[in-house]
Amino acid sequence: MRKPERAGGHDIRPARVRLPEIKPETQEKAEKSEEVASLRRGAGREEQLIPRRLPPPVAGALLRSARSRQVDPQAIRKRRETLKYKSFREAIDGCRELHPLPVELIESQLPSDSSWLLAQLKEIRTMEHLKTFADSLSYRDLSLLFTSLSLLKRREETDQVQNLIRLRACHYLYLCGWLTLQYTYPRSSVSKALSDLCMILEDVRFVRESERRTGRRVTPLPGIPLGPWRMIWSRVPLISGIALPNSRYFISDIAGEIYDSKSDLNAFFHEYAIYPGLPLAEAITTRYKEMVSGVAANPLLSQDFFDRFRKTED
């Protein structure tokens, strides 16, 4: 093998490096820190070798699950007899009974339920008493507010119910009022109270959205297909985004929104929880068909114009 040629033809001489002098105190500190680090490394290895013990609740659950595999069939039968729901189907029916949908609450209401609420309101004399009574109402009681409002005519009574609605304003109460309006359309007392509730909820939503913008960015929830006429009730938007329920052009504004957006009528009904066959849906459908056919351009040809002169059957 050839030796590498020397650069410049000069010999390479070893260089001398002068190390700084280390004091004895610094040397002792370095040795002590090295001993502490080695002890810590050894303690960590010992902890890895020691088996971990589960906390008592987790260990108890594992023991119970292991014992349940060894229980005889008769003991399992006795345990099932003490259960409230004997099968999965019964458990589902029990959940539906305890937590009904808003539309199921509205359909299952009786006249006696509203009379109970009105009797309670007659005993209220002060605003403090009204606030206490509003806080004591359950979700089933809240579903009676708009139904009771549709049965009242005196202004003193309707004002008390509207105050209860303002005190317990929430999206669930909006759903109950929205469904009640679909059954009782065009009841003015219900539409007026529902419009008032929508404005309160819009103010609350504006405040919450402004707080979220300053805090963190919220990503929209993904859409989940649940099947025909099954919906997530918490995501049902307010109808006031299109028009207030007590507006004179409420039906025309909704039908115009469907016509201008070129959306499917049934898809729009499903989005806003409008049930076909009810008076409100029928009015919207009639107005929408008039816009599609061009009859709405001539008011004299509309269905409302002919209904004014139609004679009632004996």
Image (cartoon, rainbow, N blue to C red):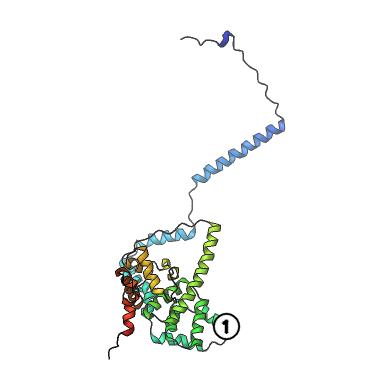
Query: From this viewpoint, which residue is outermost toward the top?
Result: 9
Q: Amino acid at mark 1?
A: Met
Q: Is residue 67 above or below residue 14?
A: below
Q: Residue at x 42, y 70 (%)?
A: 239
Q: Residue at x 57, y 8 (%)?
A: 9
Query: From this viewpoint, which residue is outermost toward the bottom?
Result: 314
Query: Quadrant of the rendered structure where residue 106 is?
Result: bottom left
Closer to the camera in the image, 13 or 313: 313
Q: Position of residue 28 (x, y in %)?
A: 68, 34
Circle 1 packing at 10 Å, graded few (<14), some (14-19), many (20+), is few
Answer left or right for 288 relative to 125.
left
Where, quadrant-wise, is the C terminus in this rendering?
bottom left
Q: Position of residue 12 (x, y in %)?
A: 59, 12
Residue pointed to by mark 1: 127
Q: Is residue 48 visible?
A: yes
Q: Position of residue 293 (x, y in %)?
A: 29, 69
Q: Is residue 122 above or below residue 194?
A: below
Answer left or right for 42 relative to 172.
right
Q: Position of residue 129 (x, y in %)?
A: 56, 83
Query: From this viewpoint, which residue is outermost toward the left?
Result: 314
Closer to the camera in the image, 9 or 242: 242
Q: Is residue 87 visible?
A: no
Total numbered badges shown on the rendered structure? 1
Element at label 1: helix
Answer left or right for 30 relative to 218.
right
